[in-house]
Amino acid sequence: MKQLLEHIRTDALAAFSAAGDAQALDALRVKYLGKKGELTALLKQMGRLSPEERPVMGQLANQVREALASALERRQRDLEAQALTARLTSEAVDVTIPGRPAVLGHRHPMYIALDEIKDIFVSMGFQVVDGPEVELAEYNFDKLNAEEGHPSRDWSDTFYFDTDSRVMLRSQTSPMQVRSMEVMPLPIRIIAPGRVYRKDEVDATHSPMFHQVEGMVIDKNVTMADLKGTLNLLAEQLFGKGTVTRFRPHHFPFTEPSCEMDVQCHKCGGAGCPTCKGEGWIELLGAGMIHPNVLRMAGIDPEIWSGWAFGMGLERTAMRRFKIADLRLIFENDMRFLEQF
């Protein structure tokens, strides 16, 4: 048995030294030291020895086991160190190679215009509010004095979710005016930017999805002069001193009197071109004095309080702000276009 133990020790130590990786080393561990390994099988034969031989062979067997365990541990550490060295070599980074420059993005031109609009109104004491894009017709039409039968409520103009035309994609951010009147204390000064949806054909100045900024003031003794002064200030702050505007009479169900505000076409300077459809002007927003019915439906006494409101297309504002000739460029994400800003 002594010769067998020495033979196992010699073979195992040589095999451990020759193991090329952790998997091979573990297989050798099982072969020599496992429950069914060679050393374990030999030790099971100790019962055949005489009482005098057992202590001697037992001591030798323990020495062999300890020697194999120590050799196994050393080889395992060596293999781990070799694997780490190989990994560090393969993953080495040449710090002398120039790095790749990080390309920083920038705000979209439309959101540059929106931030400027927010800054202008916040500086005048307005609060920015936000609301749902999936809206109830009650807020999008009814409480804005647009009764059943109004053309804007037709299925050819508005995206509805249900057959009874009560749930819809909002066609304007005006519902936030009503929602604000219902919960905010008077006086109120708000703007409400956001996405809106209408069944418009895509062309140089129209899109079925676009962005609006609505504004509203409710206070005592508010007049049309306050509205025109505020909007002219907005135009000059956005487009520069001396920006030419005009106000035209119009009709909206939620304002009375109502108007539309145009700015002179940035492309042709008023001479007429495809961008302004030959008119020399680009419609920027609709506005007017809030209709007494809208105030009453929100629980506000029109005999005490008055107000004005407007709604402007953000894309058209960006077009005028950055002299963009075609609204579709804003949505196409063409880097050649966006990098100009």
Image (cartoon, rainbow, N blue to C red):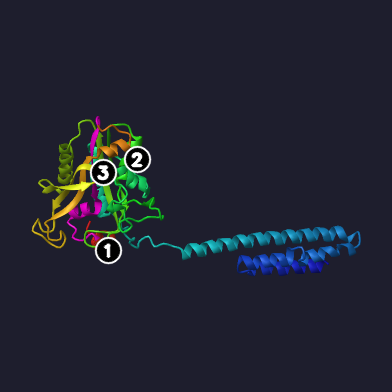
Disc with the residue nearer the chain's start (1 vs 3): 3
Residue at the extreme front of the image, as rendered: 149
Q: Nearer the viewer, residue 196 or 166?
A: 166
Between the C-alphas of marks 1 and 3, the distance is: 38 Å
At horizontal 80% and vertical 66% (from top left) the residue drawn is: 41
Q: Amino acid at mark 3?
A: Phe
Residue 220 position within the rendered picture, expressed as x and y whole percent measured from the top left: 23, 30
Residue at mark 2 = 179
At horizontal 26% and vertical 45% (from top left) the residue drawn is: 214
User: Of the numbered discs in the image, which one, if any, rests on residue 334?
Assistant: 1
Q: Nearer the viewer, residue 255 or 273?
A: 255
Label 1 residue SS = loop
Residue 19 position within the rendered picture, expressed as x and y whole percent measured from the top left: 63, 69
User: Does residue 107 show up?
Assistant: no
Q: Residues within 10 Å of mark 3 (few under 14, many from 20)?
A: many
Q: Is residue 229 left or right of residue 302?
A: left
Disc with the residue nearer the chain's start (1 vs 2): 2
Q: Is residue 150 left or right of residue 30?
A: left
Residue 215 position within the rendered picture, expressed as x and y whole percent measured from the top left: 25, 42
Residue at mark 3 = 254
Q: Nearer the viewer, residue 106 or 42?
A: 106
Residue 79 position within the rendered picture, expressed as x and y whole percent measured from the top left: 59, 63
Between disc 3 and disc 2, the foreground one is: 3
Location of residue 14 with respect to 211 vertically, above or below: below
For residue 241, what is the image quadrant?
top left
In reply to whether residue 248 is colored magenta, the answer given is no
Q: Amino acid at mark 2?
A: Arg
At horizontal 34% and vertical 51% (from top left) the residue drawn is: 170
Between the C-alphas of marks 1 and 2, the distance is: 37 Å
Q: Amino acid at mark 1?
A: Asp
Q: Which residues are magenta?
A: 303-327
